Image (cartoon, rainbow, N blue to C red):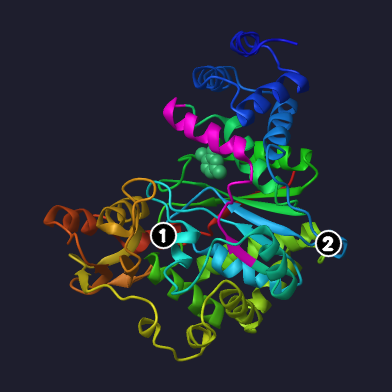
Amino acid sequence: MLSIPDLIKKKRDGMKLSDEEIKTFIQAVTDKTIQECQTGAMLMAIWQKGMVAKETVTLTKEMMTSGEVMSWPDEWAGLVVDKHSTGGVGDKVSLVLAPALAACDCKVPMISGRGLAHTGGTLDKLESIPGFNIHQPIGQVQEILASVGCCIVGQTEMLVPADRVLYALRDATSTVDSLPLITGSIISKKGAESLSALVLDVKFGRAALYKDLNSAKELAQSLVEVGNGLGIRTAAVLSSMDTTIGRCVGNSVEVIESLETLKGNGPDDLMELVTTLGGELLRMTGLVSELPEGKKRISDAVVSGAALSKFQAMMEAQGVARETAQQLCSTHTNYYSILRKSKHQMELKTQDSGVVMDVDGLCLAQILHKLGAGRSQAGAPINHSVGAELLVSLGQRVNKGVSWLQLHYESPVPTPDQINRLQNCLILGSDANTQTCQQSLVKEIITH
Ligand code: IUR
């Protein structure tokens, strides 16, 4: 058996590691018998020399089994599904998709994350609902799946401990952007949920992890190959992430937009993503035979109110008082009698007339982050009431002086420079180009 320095040397020199060698490395990481500098060196060797698909599958499997792996009743075989997104702005897909899938008879043990850099996190959004508890032990997750069909929770200490160690060291060693390491990190956590099917929303564009379609596609292909290699039916949807998804960005405001979507009033771009990702999952489970049928079933679950009932039941099962859950899900509710409204609102006005060509989702998210919608560092508090609502749509003709953005803020208040930068997020153009700005978000679906 090679020693840890030998393993590092082997990868450093561009050779493939055997299953046994990868197992040795991950075990040493998990048991903490390896020095941090050695882990860092191996991460850099992997970053530089890469891994072939077989090595990545083994790395992912070993990471997955470094901790607790969930198990489900036999009668759920084929029905346990989840989605992962590489992170976006205004990405509230999970809040609509999880209950919609539950309404289509799937079981959805959705393990979500917190906001990272300028992107929002599903857990932060849900915590703007008073009482919502994202910490659920595995036994409770199974009970909620049995009674409701979906839950949205945080990662427990016991799930994929090797990823915790590697992820922290990747940050410290500039090895975050490595295809095998990203793949191992994402798929190991999904694998530990013992899924039947997994769909990945791999985003590309200005506000995404990967700016260009080709690198996003490379990641999507690696995720799909390794997911399938682990025995999970896996597909990836490549979707563009330049502006915001829907109209709202922030925590409370995104919960409101999600609830409105579950009441049948959702924006087209959000519904397109929800139905495509959900439809693909239904196709992979075999509940439908073709994607269009799957999309229709998801859309029907939302429009009929079946998904809303699941969301209400999920809130109650995760600690929200019955009356609160009922009120949030009723037709004419005053959301701000329950969710905290920011102390101040401000409407930004268009400085010209024209057609809305673009809204810079990255710049908008970065400013909201600074105003308290995101964290300055891990563990720091966030202000759930901070956010923004877009009052215009792409392709819409607007006159000079109309309100285009409502900003919700408290402390810090936006500086003149921030307001100026927000104004520059809105790009107006001439009528001739309206078609180019109203394209579908979904570019491609990768199934193998
Ligand atoms: N999300 C993860 O879970 N792992 C990663 O490596 C990245 C995002 I980048």
Is residue 168 covered in magenta? Answer: yes
Q: Quadrant of residue 250?
A: bottom left
Please state, as top left, top right, bottom left or bottom right, where the C terminus lies in the image: top right
The answer to whether residue 105 of the structure is visible from this angle is: yes
Choose the circle earlier in sequence order: 1 or 2.
2
Q: Camera-side residue: 338 or 386?
A: 338
In the picture as drawn, the residue positioned furthest to the bottom comes out as: 332
Residue at x 32%, y 65% (from the top left corner): 387
What is the x, y in percent for residue 287? 82, 66
**Helix, strand or loop at disc 2?**
loop
Residue at x 72%, y 28% (from the top left corner): 53
Residue type beneath disc 2:
Pro
In the picture as drawn, the residue positioned furthest to the left comes out as: 416
> Is ligand 1 within 8 Å of the beta carbon of the residue shown at mark 1?
no
Quadrant containing ligand 1 reads: top right
Q: Camera-side residue: 334 or 41?
A: 41
In the picture as drawn, the residue positioned furthest to the right comes out as: 74
Q: Which residue is mark 1?
A: 244
What is the x, y in percent for residue 443? 58, 51
Please state, as top left, top right, bottom left or bottom right, where the N terminus lies in the image: top right
What is the x, y in percent for residue 106? 75, 67
Left or right, 324 with reference to 201:
left
Near mark 2 (Cα within 10 A), the count class, few <14, some 14-19 or many ≥20, is few
**Helix, strand or loop at disc 1?**
loop
Near mark 1 (Cα within 10 A), the count class, few <14, some 14-19 or many ≥20, is many
Mark 1–mark 2 Cα distance, whole angstroms, equals 39 Å
Q: Quadrant of residue 382?
A: bottom left
Q: Which residue is mark 2?
A: 73
Query: Which residues lie in the magenta part?
Result: 151-174
Is residue 157 covered in magenta? Answer: yes
The answer to whether residue 427 of the structure is visible from this angle is: no
Residue at x 78%, y 60% (from the top left corner): 283
